[in-house]
Amino acid sequence: MARTSDFHLQFQEFDDDTTVTFDDPIKSRKQRSAESGFLEDETDNVTLNGDDKTEFLSDQRKSAPFWTFEYYQMLFDVDSHQVKNRILGSILPWPGKNFVEVYLRRKPDLYGPFWICATLVFAIAISGNISSFLTHQGQPEYKYVPDFRKVTMAATAIYSYAWLVPLALWCFLTWRNRKTTSLVSYSFLQIVCVYGYSLSIYIPAVILWIIPSEGLRWCSIVVALCLSGSVLVMTFWPATRDDKPRITIAVMTSIVILHILLAVGCKVVIWRAVASIAWTVILLPLTTALFLFLSRFCLFHPIQWIVECVSLLTAPSTIFSLVVLCGVVLATGFFNLEFYTLVPSIPCSRVALLGTVLHPRQCVHSLVYCIMGMLMMWCASVIIGGRYSTIGSPCKLSESGELISCLNEYHLFLLLAGAFIGYSHSFLGVVQNMYYVSFQPIEQYNYLRFKGSLTMVVKCSVIQALYSARNFTVLYLFFGYLPKTWISSTLNLQIDSSLQPLDSVTGLLDFSLLYHLSISGTFLYLTWYITVLLFRIYVTEAYSFPVQSLFTEDAEQCLPKVLSEKNTLVMKFLALQDLALLSQHSPSRRQEVFSLSQPGGHPHNWNAISKECLSLLSELTQRLVAHQDAVASNGRIKSLSASSDTKSGSSGSSVILGAEDLPETPRPNMPLRTPGSVFLKSSMGGMHGPLTAPFTPDLDSPFSSPAIRRLAGQQDPHSPWFGSVQSPHVMRRGPKLWSASTESQTNGSPPPSPATLPSPPPANLKPSFLTQWLQNRREQVKSFLAKRVLIMYLFNKLPEASSQALFADSQAQIWALQGLSHLVAASYSEDQFGVVQTTLPTILSFLVVLLEAVDKHFKLPHASSKPVRTASCVGDSTYKTLRFALRAALKTAIYRITTTFGEHLNAVKISTEHRKRLQQFLEFKE
Amino acid sequence: MCSLSLFPSPRTSGATLYEHNNELLQGHNKQLYDLPSPEFSRDVVKGHSRPESCSSKSAFLDQTDTLWMRSAGAWRDVGLHGLLDEITNSAEEVPRWLAVSSGCLLALLRWASSFHGSLFPHLTLSGDEMVAEFSQMLDWSDSAIRSFAWHAHTDKFAVALQDDSIKIYKSNSSLSPTLKHRCQRSVCDLQWKPLCGSVLAVACQSCLLIWHVDPTSLSTRPSSGCAQVLSHPGHSPITSISWSPTGSLLVSASPVDTAMMVWDVAAEGCVPLQRVGGGGVTYLSWSPDGSRLLAATPSALFRVWETRMWTCERWPCVKGSCQSGCWSPDGSCLLFSIQGERLVYALTFSDLTGGPKAATVVADLSETSFTGPDGDITVGGEVRSLAWDPRGERLAVLLKGDSQAVSHPSVIAVFKTRSSPVFELLPCGFVMGEDGTEPRFMQFHPHFQHGALLTVCWSDGHISHVPFYFSGAGPSAGASQQPNTDHSTNKLYTQHAL
């Protein structure tokens, strides 16, 4: 690859010379006629700058072939004032000034780009470290540890951006050059140089990141983005200007989009995610080649088919689309990072589900996936070639003898299908919780896990693609004329009336069209599913934390520290998983847990671990007890709210308001309830957020007792009931309130809201009349709405949802139970210092209390009913059965302890009820 | 190597009652130990005379349908084969080309499946035949008792009967709940969940059933709502299941599925573990320490999985598939037998040496004749199943006899085992039943206080318990009945003879 590009490079540069100077008068004239304005401008500059001598000298030196040292020496041969000018030029976009024409001309250097990239890498790393130091400065237990991984990460990202994007752009320009001859041609080195210099503005922007203010950081990034982006746009504008307008637009937008991606990508620094995305990209050529072979499949000429496909594999158009596909996959990979979650969001009613689908976050996701789908489909149609390759095709001669281009409906059909597939992927993703990352019951090596699930993924993507193809075909049959007329009018393409229109039954009954549609749909789904699959595999890989470390620098990485960490949920999960594994499999690490600290002789490790596990368990117990209280005490709440009629009346009215404007207004406080993404810091979700978040749906029920509200309010400042209820947004949550109250009209009414509501002030003055009236109205409206089947359908609570939501994060508790019980069981023979014995009564009573709470929960209606097993492909539905898994893990944990200790348990000090319960376990009567 | 000729001569009068002072005693008084020993005669538990195919077609009169309806029905009932068959059979109603092409396709399919079947002959068997072939129960299809399982911690066992019901017996309780379920057909294996009082896993013809039998309940017929149904497409019939010793995972195997399933039972999720080769998995056995898992395949190959990262070692056999296997209590030694051979092999795993290179023969069980008071008796044959008691002191081997010859019955040979300093097998004796009965299945009681307790299912449908009283070589053994003095003579039979 490098060899060929170098050849091109020489050739191109030689070409370039001819355009400006006098060596090739014919071509020069042609060029001049094509864009005379620019050339004049440029010659002016050349004379003004007075660098002609050096320029021409360098031209002569250019004859050095690329394998000699001189050739590369030349690339670094710049003066400092030239570099300075170039940097300034890249920072300040000046209308009409082309960066290449003005500053680089025929002498691109690699000196500037290389050092700018290096500086940027270190600036990112240093400012990242400093800013993390500054944010943690106040905390006493924080120890500054330099994170050198930031350097490698940033280096990978920046250098690959500075090389790969120019490569793609150059491929594309060369490809287009074959079709239209009158383009300004840039050499590969020139493009690299432009991109390298355009990064220079980021250095001051990144230094500004030190200031710990999220807003300022984004501001600086946006400013830098605009400046350097506009330089890029102005540089590449003439290169594409003469091509058809839509190509121009496409190239320009993709340049800008890639640039934006770089700016955003700087902020995401997660090693495993990057590994998974890298693997996805590495796998992409394989799937693309497969797709190419399948798309050109020809039963009757197998040899010709294979030969043709092999030659196509190396064609510039294929390579270009491959590069674009890589970009798209990278973008989806990084974009998805914001959406992965360890705790699934479980909508409690159909309206809540609708709200999730219409949520702005989800809308952005759908939009991005639509665009990605279209881009990928465009690449696919370029790869398929033939009648699909371009959107406009010359079809007929006009009166004046010119060719008029017509709209190629096949291309449009595929593009729209891409958008449709993108949307349906995004939609199914939220409905089936595709971004929920669940942990496997067993460990496997990544490669084997991937191999094992590959067939499933392929099968799923084929099935899903067939469904999508069917749905899209039907959709296009009825509504296909809309985009068709719109595109043809905006792009000034005529509709060829001689061809069969595609939005008719006969037009769509085209086997090859449908075949290509489903094949490319499969390709799209497969790529996306593989992205998700690889991410899941990489993130859930077990990580082994040291139990204790000899060096204080690594203290942050130790298991007890990470367990008690509240910042990143995924680290906590990994630590718990590691705890469960070490307690089962590794005697030497168990020994470390049971060990005493060297000076002092305190069992710090065991104390920290057991404390953290027990706090997890007790939190679940509290949640369950609160939920049972809420269910049990609906009657009391009713009388309470009836007395405080003002508030309930006002909230009732606003409930109706909320219900009316619901479908258009997705609730803005949803992100608080949707559990934070895997990587979100505590500011957003944190450990407390997601842990209590699943419970919030039940807070909405009018039956929630004040006790829970207090509990949730204390633990979760983001809970809608915590203070911030004043915001009118909360009232948009009305449907939730409403759903519950419709469900139980007879005894339910909205809860007394603890905050001021947009209620009419006169209500306080004349409660007797107005409240009466409001009460009546509300009853009327309620009974009116309750009779409408659709509304009941939408607002009725899904039966199991509240149970599922309560146990949504139970994986953490399951591991805690496994880890604790194995450690306690092992302590029977391995614990030399009796470290565990002191906490044994506490652990046993916690377990029994939790067991009682869980047993009680399973006596509630719907709690013990099994979920319907859905055959959803990639979407993970293990969260639906987590409560059963938790119950089983709990019982097994107690059994493990009782069978190990046996009769010795009678010597442990616990209360009589607990002892009675444990006796049941000793006799195997549970 | 130990061989049957070193064994004391089997006595044919009366059933074996117990072992005491290194001697197996015979007698006729039945109930010696306080455990339920039920008896099931074959007439009482006669299975339903179900037709082999599950379609109810034969119950209805023939009706002339349109070809379209018939094809749809055939597609729904039998799948592609049925559809093609239907089209080919009604050649006069369809265009000629369609009939011919479907006929060709059908022939092609048959050829392909027969080719596949010639690679893996077991695939040509029907469901019940396959279960009978790979079950640990000797003569499974003819036996009144289909499977048997002790509970890991209590004196409680479950018995699967020929009429597809399961009965649960407890010591000192006359209550025996009967479990029946619509999906509970052709039960091949039963396993109680360790570290749990109530959960019983049942391997059925079409699915895996997880019963939750409440030990405190007084009901004799738990409803089928107490059972979880776990199934995975292409994973039936299930011939073997095994719980992990920690009770968290369940592994199931089917001879037609190359993947074995690792189930997270409570969450109803499964992870298929697939490896190429073997054509299926027939028998699973988890080592008592939970670190390894034996998975036998229908072809001459078995695998030993390590359960940390779930990677496997392949163990190709020279001839025949692995029929049965058992682990020593510490999980370091695996004994297994090969179908059609009269040998017991041993594999010793240790973390230090990086695993064994080849299996060693530890016992030769070829036919040996003993002359008794009432005629000759031949003992020995193919090893059908192996069982090792939880203390690692007694090894029971079920030897298949010749069903034609009266003087060559199936017997259980019991060895004494010792693992230190070198692994050795010493002869102990034969466990015989009442006259005319043969053992079908055996299992050791998982926590017998005074030694080992072997439970045997007999061909006449009764279950008996044979205690072996000994005190182990462990530290608690005060008055050692184990003959320590004859170490030198015992060397004769040990491994070094190989």
Image (spheres, helix red, strand yellow):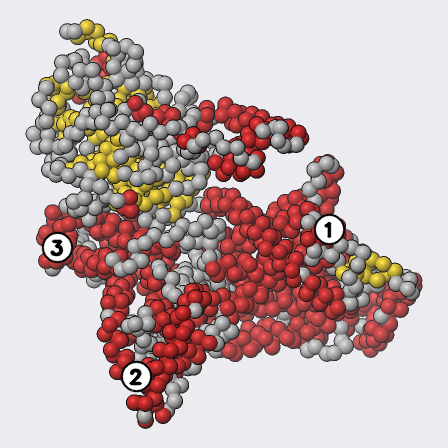
Q: Nearer the viewer, residue B494 or A503?
A: A503
Where's residue B77, x and y in %? 48, 36
At label 3, the amino acid type is Arg
Find residue B336 and report its image quarter.
top left
Image x and y of residue A189, in percent: 72, 61
Left or right: A113 in relation to B262: right
| Number of numbered labels in the structure image | 3
Judging from the image, mark 2 belongs to the subunit labelled: A
- Residue placed under numbered mark 2 in the picture: A645
Cα separation, mark 3 vs mark 1, equals 76 Å
Describe residue B381's horizontal placement relative to residue A673 as left or right: left
Discs 1 and 2 carry the same chain letter: yes
Q: Residues within 10 Å of mark 1 (few under 14, many from 20)?
A: some
User: On the image, numbered disc 1 is attached to which residue?
Assistant: A385
**Disc 3 is attached to a residue of which chain?**
A
Q: Earlier in the sequence, mark 1 or mark 2?
A: 1
Q: Which mark is residue B137?
A: none
Q: Nearer the viewer, residue B367 or B435?
A: B435
